[in-house]
Amino acid sequence: MIEIEKVTAGYGDGPDILHGINLNADGGEIVTILGPNGCGKSTLLKTIAGFVKPRSGRVLLNDTDLTPVPANEKVRYHRMGFVPQSDNIFRTLTVAENIAMGARFLPKAERAAAVQRQFKAYSTLADKANRKASALSGGERQLLSLARALVSNPTVLLLDEPSAGLSPAMVHEVFEAIADIRDRTGMCIVMVEQNAFEALGVADRAYVLALGQVALEGRAKELLADPAMRHLYLGGEPEATVTTT
């Protein structure tokens, strides 16, 4: 569904941050992008979303070249949802108004029903529909940002650090919600994360970036069990070799 071909990208007149990245993600799977700070994870996601234009390479969705298409057109015409890491809700609006903002590109006759579908999926938000978004907990705000992205019924969902700033309990709840979206809708989900253990726990596949290049890729469970992966990218120590005499 999503295919990134040899993408090189950066900001303004600055140096390249991405160096010939290749990536693919299909419907019905979660693909997570991991790596240390500054490796290019968020830049890659923003390039897919259309906020950063590649200097070379292509971004394809269902075999259609969307490389020059800006983010607002990808959302409106190509059914792509994007949840940024920060400033991802309108704090002065109510929960219902936030979700309705995500439905603004739908035909007017469909908007109310689309909002209600999100309230049916997220009862926590339904109970607080008329509260200001600023009154929600961190986890509830993240669920709200997901609901607002989902209300337009995208086929692709891009998530930038969905666990940022959350308590461990809320991190687990948010990742469960993301896995439920995949299982319930068959959506293609591409997720940038720092919390590698939780991300790999729900992802199907993963790409690990280092210095703007793909250093490792594979099935999530296999990477999670790889001692080299744990040592280099997850902050753990390789398991000691046990010998017997």
Image (tube, rainbow, N blue to C red):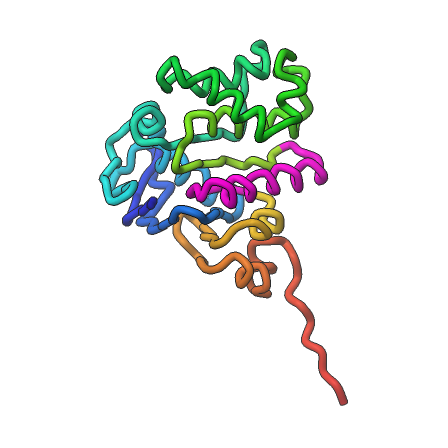
Residue drawn 28% across and 43% down? 62
Between residues 191 and 96, which one lies in front from this camera angle? 96
- Magenta region includes residue 181: yes
Please provide percent x and percent y for residue 13.
30, 30
Between residues 134 and 122, which one lies in front from this camera angle? 122
Give the total number of marks visible in the rendering. Answer: 0
Between residues 157 and 236, which one lies in front from this camera angle? 157
- Magenta region includes residue 211: no
Query: Which span of residues is magenta-colored?
Result: 165-193
Please provide percent x and percent y for residue 162.
56, 35
Query: Where, quadrant-wise, is the N terminus in this rendering?
Result: top left
Residue drawn 31% across and 31% down? 78
* Helix, strand or loop for the magenta stretch, by majority: helix
Between residues 223 and 111, which one lies in front from this camera angle? 111
From this view, report whether residue 151 is shown above or below residue 225: above
Q: Is residue 137 visible?
A: yes
From this view, report whether residue 199 is shown above or below residue 171: below
Please provide percent x and percent y for residue 18.
36, 44
Direction right: furthest residue: 245
Please provide percent x and percent y for residue 193.
54, 42
